[in-house]
Every structure is written in structure tokens, then in C-alpha cells.
Image (tube, coloured by chain):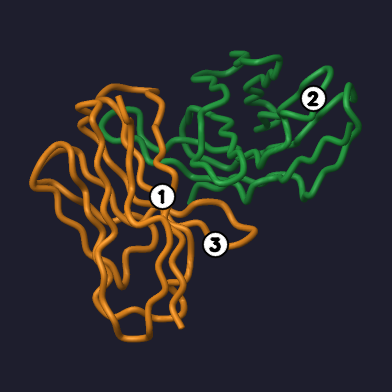
Chain colours: A orange, B green
Amino acid sequence: NAGVTQTPKFRILKIGQSMTLQCTQDMNHNYMYWYRQDPGMGLKLIYYSVGAGITDKGEVPNGYNVSRSTTEDFPLRLELAAPSQTSVYFCASAPQGAYNEQFFGPGTRLTVL
Amino acid sequence: GNSVTQMEGPVTLSEEAFLTINCTYTATGYPSLFWYVQYPGEGLQLLLKATKADDKGSNKGFEATYRKETTSFHLEKGSVQVSDSAVYFCALSEGVQGAQKLVFGQGTRLTINP
């Protein structure tokens, strides 16, 4: 199993550009999450999904969109990139059930200039 | 809302030293508590967890006990190694049923010198 994979690893965007961060998991997990990690800070939840076709906002959803058309994929879309979105983005997945571990991808480092 | 506070880093120790990283939380209800570790250039990995008061989580020589009376979940290891150098995150989960949403502390960077 590859686990949770994310692409790209690094990206530099100009203000106003758009991009999609890809996330795929091969563990057949129902739950998927997107977090951002700012320097010296913990991770903050952007969006999450409990299954295909179902998504919901986390703590910091503004400026982002998500979709979940399959169990495996959970892309994160930035429509109009802003410097405040410079961060490291982590995707995670978890099996259904209480107290279950979240499995994290390696992250995407995004810089908006 | 729920929150997690960790001791300020960075923390630098010599090999075989005793480690404590403090973590306290504020939460309604009875969350599960976690320690995640992030090695350089990698995503987070679960180190240990505890799901109810007085539970002790343990893994790879690390331990943490869920203390409801002091709302704490301090991470300890008796003898650290250079390979333990990483960033450690304390977290709590919101929600028992459905998708658990994690609330993280700010992380503590640990460096172990040989």
C-alpha cells in the first residue's frame, strides 16, 4: 500500500492564480481531511469528508474548495491564491469508527508570491 | 472552543537524557488525546493515544497518561536517542462518532545531540 499520496511536493504560485492539490489514498478509508500547517504552528483543519459526495468545512475553509467524487481522491482547490495561503498542506485519511488513527500524506509546500 | 497548549520549543537534550514535553488541553466533553510525531520532510505519524481518563498510551519507549483532573497529557521518555529528533504534536479529537476532527497544539521541536 502506498498509503496517502499528495502531489505536487512543492509549488510556487503568483497572486491570483489557481491550482489543485491532489490527494489519493489506497486504504479504502471513508474519512479524509485537509490541514494547513503554518510555520511554528499546529495543523488547522480546512475541510473534511465522511465519504464520496459528502464534504464539510473545518476551522479555516475560506479561499478553498473541495470535492469527493470517489473514495480514493480528495482534491483541494485554491481559486485565487493569496500570500496568506502560503503554507504546508497535509492530506489525511482515517477508517470509519471511533478513536481511529489518521494517516497523513507527506505534504505539499505552497508559496504564493 | 477546544484547544491544546504545548510547552514552548525548541528543546535540545543529550542522548540518554530524560524527556518531558508538557501538553494541556481545554475541551468540552471527554476527547481522545494523541501524540503525533513529524520527522524531517515527512507527514505526521501517530505515536500514541489515550481514549479515556487514566489511560496510558505507550509506544517506542514514549508514554503519556490522560489526566482529567489536570487536563494534561504530558509526553515522557526515559532515555532519548538521536533518532528521536523530530517535531512532536499533542492533539485532541472532537467528536466520538462520525469523522473525528483533530485539534493540534503548536508542536515542539526536539533535537537530541550525541
Looking at the rendered structure, the secondary structure element under dot 1 is strand
Q: Amino acid at mark 1?
A: Phe
Please determine if labels 2 and 3 lie on a single subunit: no
Q: CA distance from mark 3 to mark 1?
A: 11 Å
Looking at the picture, how far across and down is residue B85, in whole percent?
73, 36
Check disc 3 and report the residue beneath it.
A38
In this rendering, the count of numbered labels is 3
Q: CA distance from mark 2 to mark 3?
A: 28 Å
| Spatial CA span between label 2 and label 1 | 27 Å
- Name which quarter of the figure residue A25 lies in: top left
**Chain under callout 2:** B
Q: Is residue A35 above or below residue B72?
A: below
Chain under disc 3: A
- The residue where tag 2 is placed is B81
Which is more N-terminal, label 1 or label 3?
Answer: 3
Residue ID for mark 1: A90
On screen, residue A79 above or below B1: below
Q: Nearer the viewer, mark 2 or mark 3?
A: 2
In this picture, residue A10 sits left or right of residue A25: right
Quadrant hosting residue B64: top right
Q: Are the residues at dot 3 and dot 1 in contact (C-beta closer than 8 Å)?
A: no
Tell me the kind of residue under disc 3: Asp
Label 2 Cα crowd, 10 Å radius (few <14 / some 14-19 / many 20+): some
Say which quarter of the image contains residue B18: top right
Q: Position of residue B7 (x, y in %)?
A: 76, 45
Q: Secondary structure at mark 3?
A: loop
Q: Amino acid type of disc 2? A: Gln
